Image (spheres, grey):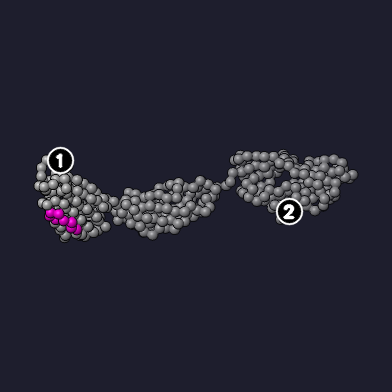
Amino acid sequence: MANPNVTQATSTVSNQAALSMTTTNATQLVSNAASSNRVYLIRGVTVANTDTSAVNVTVAIYRAATNSGTAYELASTVSVPAGSSLVVVERSQGVSLLENQSIYVTAATASKLKVFASWDEVYMPTPVTIPGQVTGLTATSGNDHIALSWTAPTDNGNGQLSYIVESSTNGGASFATEKTVSGTSTTVTGYESGTSLIFRVAASNSAGMGAYSTQTPSVVYRTTLYWTVTENTSSAYGIGSSGSTATSYGSLPSTPTSMQRMFSATLTSQVAGTLAVLVSSQGENNSASVDAGSSTLSVSGTQIRSTSASVTAGQSVTVYGTVRNTTNFSSSYLQFTFTIS
């Protein structure tokens, strides 16, 4: 412990010790253990001499829990008169015993000496240190987000942790702060589809920020908005889904006002990829077509057909459909399923 500021103490208790000297060797009176998070404020040391002659005593602080190393004498060869007591260390001297320090007494004649010490034990708050390194960072791309998770450092520095999440869009050449969170997982959103990102995380407390985690491999951000849909006719019934796996329907209302419904819609791709189209038709006179530029698909009557085509970002796909059934309105439908990957 560095030199403490006792005004930050969490609590204080009083303590005392008595020693009967049985040897002329240095004998421990008070010891403050290493890492005790306490400071001993010495109130006084008193020596009682029951011998018939004066005895010299020495009281010293050692910079260790035992009487090893250099001794710093508080009272040196003080003569304690016969049959009397003498205060050899007073509170006014401002003596304190830090962690891993001790007080020893040495006497010229031991068998007739009693030594008494009293002190206040000041409990100090556990010092906060910089936390250790975050480990186990993973980044997983999901629909319109990247999920991050990691393992807290084994050493939290005795402080409340938060986590600084940083990302790089230039291969790790530079990083920017995404967010600061309290838990060991989070999600990142808001990037354009196809953006490659690298992440790193560091733990932080009131003492500062720990070492960054190992960087993640590059992960690609994918958005669920793979296309947008525009209805081209007011009679487009049920066309309007957008997403990574969107299903759009064209069908007669449950109480049709006519025996025919026509619709048209345009799907505009937001990413480059492969567009797969599945068309299911139920109805004796239905018809439908999908125009994806290099690939077209047409359906009539009761059929299920599929096709796929490569599309670029911004490319449009046009869908036409006619639902027509003169026999059974309720069972007539056209179903389009679009998937892009």
| Number of dots carrying numbers | 2
Taking the view exactly as shown, the residue that stands out farthest to the front is 327
Quarter residue 200 falls in: bottom left
Q: Is residue 292 in view from this perspective?
A: no
Instruction: Name the spot of residue 253 as percent of width and height, x first.
Output: 16, 42
Pointer 2 residue: 67
Residue 29 vs residue 336: left or right? right
Give the residue at x 82% y 50%: 22
- Taking the spot 82% from the left edge, 42% from the top edge, the residue there is 48
Residue range in magenta is 299-306
Front residue (pair 160, 170): 160
Classify 241 as above or below 294: above
Q: Distance of mark 1 from mark 2, alpha carbons?
A: 101 Å
Q: What residue type is labelled 1?
A: Thr
Position in image of residue 225 (x %, y %): 27, 50
Residue 224 at what x, y percent from top left?
29, 51
Q: Which of 245 and 146 is in front in this view?
A: 245
Q: Which residue is drawn at 20% across and 56% down?
A: 278
| Residue 151 vs residue 259, the one in the foreground | 259
| Amino acid beneath label 2 | Asn
Residues packed near mark 1 inside 10 Å, few (<14), some (14 to 19) or many (20 plus): few
Q: Name the residue under label 1.
A: 255
Q: Given this view, does label 1 or label 2 mark the residue nearer the observer?
A: 1
152 to the left or right of 308: right
Q: What element carries label 1?
A: loop
Q: Quadrant of the C terminus?
A: bottom left
Q: Which residue lies furthest to the right in this view?
A: 52
Q: Is residue 6 left or right of residue 285?
A: right
Q: Picture coordinates of residue 140 (x, y %)?
A: 37, 55
